[in-house]
Image: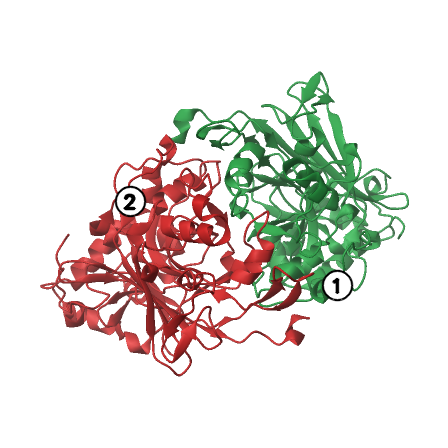
Chain colours: A red, B green
Amino acid sequence: MTDLIHSWFDSANVPDTNFPLNNLPYGVFSTNGGAHRCCTAIGDAILDLHALEESGKLEFGGALKGGSWNAFMTRGPGDWARLREALTALLREGAANTADLQPYLVPMSEARLHMPFAVTEYTDFYASRHHAFNVGSMFRDPENALPPNWLHIPIGYNGRASSVVVSGTPVTRPHGQLKGPDDAAPRFGPSQRFDIELEMGAIVGQPSSGPISVSQAFDNIFGYVLLNDWSARDIQAWEYQPLGPFQSKATATTISPWIVTAAALEPFRAAPSEREKPLLPYLAEPGPMNYDIALEVALTPEGGHETVLSRTNFREMYYSAAQQLAHHTSCGCPMRVGDLLGSGTISGPQKDSRGSLLELSWGGKEPFAIDGGTRAFIEDGDTLTLRGHAQGDGYRVGFGDCIGTVLPARSVEGNG
Amino acid sequence: MTDLIHSWFDSANVPDTNFPLNNLPYGVFSTNGGAHRCCTAIGDAILDLHALEESGKLEFGGALKGGSWNAFMTRGPGDWARLREALTALLREGAANTADLQPYLVPMSEARLHMPFAVTEYTDFYASRHHAFNVGSMFRDPENALPPNWLHIPIGYNGRASSVVVSGTPVTRPHGQLKGPDDAAPRFGPSQRFDIELEMGAIVGQPSSGPISVSQAFDNIFGYVLLNDWSARDIQAWEYQPLGPFQSKATATTISPWIVTAAALEPFRAAPSEREKPLLPYLAEPGPMNYDIALEVALTPEGGHETVLSRTNFREMYYSAAQQLAHHTSCGCPMRVGDLLGSGTISGPQKDSRGSLLELSWGGKEPFAIDGGTRAFIEDGDTLTLRGHAQGDGYRVGFGDCIGTVLPARSVEGNG
């Protein structure tokens, strides 16, 4: 574990800030309704990288001036390292000419954060052992909870990139086909079992045109975001056989506004749990490729107080993002800059480490307490918040909050 | 049924050309390795629309000069109709100044065709009654071949846009995890049951941000292409439970180079077969939204002659593309210009109207005859060709060929 890198910018040295100099996450902000600008976070401020490139203080071929991180990612690992080094030098304790940087610092409270990158395609996996076991126990057979392929394949499906939104975007409760087990026919109405999935998202920063190794896949991942894969369990139950989830997962997926880079997470690499069956060679990891990132999910009812529902850790993954990406390319599938890979719901072994309300309420049968009431699934007006950070020695590398408030379903008339 | 619209360009008036003046499909071409240019097809020639806009003879805000049709689609139905009218006026028998147009006509034999549009996201459906019945009979229970949701939902899953390629692009046989029913564990190797799916693709030409009606969905579809959804049946069998097909469908999807517009297909609208169960109101069609398009698939072994394997018709769909698109938006999923919706395999009721080798060989158990041999699935060097046209009175509106040749799998070393 490295130590805190001290900055001359004091608020970056506070032990509980998400954004010490060790982090340097990448985002996109605006002020007063202006243009979207690439930035990093340092303590309680935003550093305007768009303006720094415009002024000639940084030089990345204009990639910091496009209002999203895709162009910069495309430039590749050499420039990824060079920008991190340049920012560290500018912000480090003892740096010269710190006054020159002041005009480029914006208080975070004055900034609005936007999608940090354009999502090219979105894939969602199912790669946490405890989540797969819980869901399999509820819906299939507790004796055979894991599908037979689960210990061999990082199971995934393609999601819908157009539905990915940034933290803070309200989420409208979806309509869909619903059919109870005793109903003769389905009806069309608002989901009654609307849920979250606590996940991490890995961002592909380099393209590939054929199968790549796990090691190459690791190198191609630019960074990570928190990811909430909103899920309508009742729509899913009726639609998902035989071709998988579709409309149940396409209302919205919320990501945190800050991309925490793989470079910032490097000190927090962690090994996965022991393999229960040997992996095929194309999935073998040359080293630990999980990360030790503490995660939590909280629910705040409209006008009420927050209750933390669950605490878990990204290190629970059975398959790392690098393994998922390598598997994704195994059939020759081309990957592009901006592809987003959801880890799958991250559940730990305990009841209070489950990453979805489905698991926390055990399919709705065991409602849990929140401020002023109970919940089995999300009610209108509820705000769901994901948080995550890697804990260093006297500092943390944090993601900031990933927030969404659920609005009532559209009126039926709105469905044409 | 309208009649042939006569052109002063003689090869457009031949009864078996795919490209009479009634068609005016949109594509992208280059000559001698030059830039990609928007074009239409007329008889045996290509009309360079890029150059026509450059010269001021057409004016669409530069949308014809971008090397793909996305920018033009974004301009909306008013401009879609205006371009069709302008081209009809320029090419119609009796048009003035036909000599002025000659410099913009390129013999088709001198042109190379490219992807006509950038695929934003790709969704694949499962919406032909006979295909779903055949597959359900083979893999599940012939007595209950259709999944219980099938007569209520246009079942679909998200595919992989990065894998969509234009006709003529070779397709490398994929590797993947394979496990026979009696194998103790899976192995990683080249697919032995590589297959095609004969489909049509609908192209979304206007964005939507919430649920839309079937009628609005119909209006938002810009046009159609032939679509071959290459499928590795052995990879699919092992991976697809519980979240659907993933690597089995991500090697390649080949589309025809010409977008035949909804406007050109308007005279060929056809009603679907009778509903076996009433559809929910959000899926009701205000009128016939299928199309009468004759389809065929042919196989040519390396160095051999072509055998037509199957003849079917797009009118066989139980759900139209408009219904699929409306369903796609029902949960609030945003749709964008360039989204591609595969119809699902189009099989007819007869054995020789099945749209996949899986069905034609009944899961590999009944190999069928081709030139010089038999086939159950695709062998290396085989070329698969889809063709389609709507038959008018003395003319046809055709799609051209949608072709792919299968190359041997990569060497194992290539898989890192």
Q: Is residue A368 visible?
A: yes
Point 32% across, 59% down: residue: A353
Left/right of residue B128 with respect to residue A171 in the rendered view: right
Toward which corner of the image does residue B58 lie, by quadrant?
bottom right
Q: Is residue B59 visible?
A: no
Point 47% across, 65% down: residue: A364
Q: Are marks 1 and 2 on the same chain?
A: no
Point 58% across, 64% down: residue: B331
Q: Are marks 1 and 2 in contact (CB under 8 Å)?
A: no
Q: Position of residue A248 (x, y in %)?
A: 54, 59
Left/right of residue A270 with respect to residue A154 in the rendered view: left
Identify the chain of the residue marked 1, using the numbered disc in the image.
B
The residue singled out by tag 2 in the image is A272
The residue singled out by tag 1 in the image is B284
| SS label for mark 1 | loop
Mark 2, residues whose alpha carbon is within 10 Å: few (<14), some, or many (≥20)?
A: some
| SS label for mark 2 | loop
Q: Position of residue B112 (x, y in %)?
A: 63, 37
The kind of residue on which mark 1 rests is Ala
Mark 1 or 2: in front is 2
In depth, the one of A237 and A413 nearer the eye is: A237
